[in-house]
Amino acid sequence: MTAFGAKLVETRIRRLTKEGKVALIPYITAFDPEKGATLEFLRYLSEAEPACIELGFPFSDPVADGPTIQKAIVRALKNNPTFEEYLEMIARFKKEFPEIPIVCMTYYNILYRFGLERAVREALSSGLDGFIIPDLPMEEAGPWLKINKGKGLATVFLSAPTSGEERIRKIARLSKGFLYYVSLTGITGARESLPEDLTMRLQKIRKLLSQPLAVGFGISKPEHVRKLSPYADALIIGSALVAIIEREKKKAGKELKNFFLHLKNANS
């Protein structure tokens, strides 16, 4: 049976790392700037050999996201997207690129209203590999984890600089696919510089995990990639890519790919 879900995500991150390549995870918001553009953007990003793709489903109250992604979500919501349309797009993408894992980043209310069991069932049917739900703390994740148990989908929890060692251990026990470490306190958005103590924190956290460690929030420059790639298994690039879509609109595909490759080749 072909690998899928958490296993596919983890295997691909580890393979790229073993091959000496930087495992990068791009984030874009689905249906931004229009419904027809996202599938083309995914195709361009796939040509750049991502570790996996994090595809956001827009939500009206994105508490973890900064201005760049908030604006993308507003643009996307104007297109009246449905979660059914999102899954249909995933199914089309996975028919073309079954080897590239794709993880949905969205908020719990979207899945709750859609129906948790239905969300898992239709995610599996579409080929979606997992979920990142930033407003779902592990203490309240029981129903979601129960429905997902044994299904193979990745469920990626977030940990932050404010998370103590014991909490990170607990988050790691529940996370499947990778653990998402937020590089700084605050919201998403490209930064000029990253916290000075970040690499030291990553060295400590990595020893607590059995799955890959992915770092996100603020990563947008080749120097960021060079600095962090020795200390993490994957790096998540979001706002810098979304800003390209804001600027280039539906013609952003080629530039998304070129910028992604520019970061990926930072160590060359």
Image (spheres, rainbow, N blue to C red):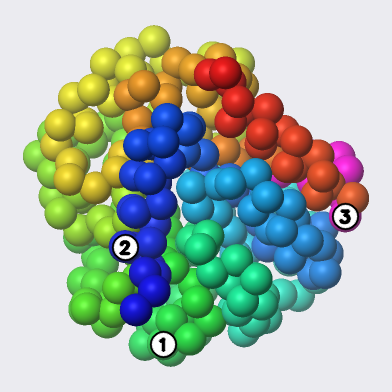
Q: Which mark is residue 210?
A: none
Which quadrant is the C terminus positioned in?
top right
Which stretch appears magenta? 242-250
Q: Is residue 18 visible?
A: yes
Secondary structure character of the magenta stretch overall: helix
User: Badge 2 local density, few (<14 within 10 Å), some, or many (20+)?
Assistant: some
User: Badge 3 local density, few (<14 within 10 Å), some, or many (20+)?
Assistant: some
Taking the spot 64% from the left edge, 53% from the top edge, the residue there is 46
User: Badge 1 local density, few (<14 within 10 Å), some, or many (20+)?
Assistant: some
Quote the CA–CA distance across marks 1 and 3. Answer: 31 Å
Q: Amino acid at mark 3?
A: Lys
Residue 243 forms part of the magenta stretch: yes
Residue assigned mark 2: 7
Residue assigned mark 1: 121
Is 250 displayed left or right of 160 in the figure? right
Q: Quadrant of residue 250?
A: bottom right
Is 262 displayed left or right of 20 in the figure? right
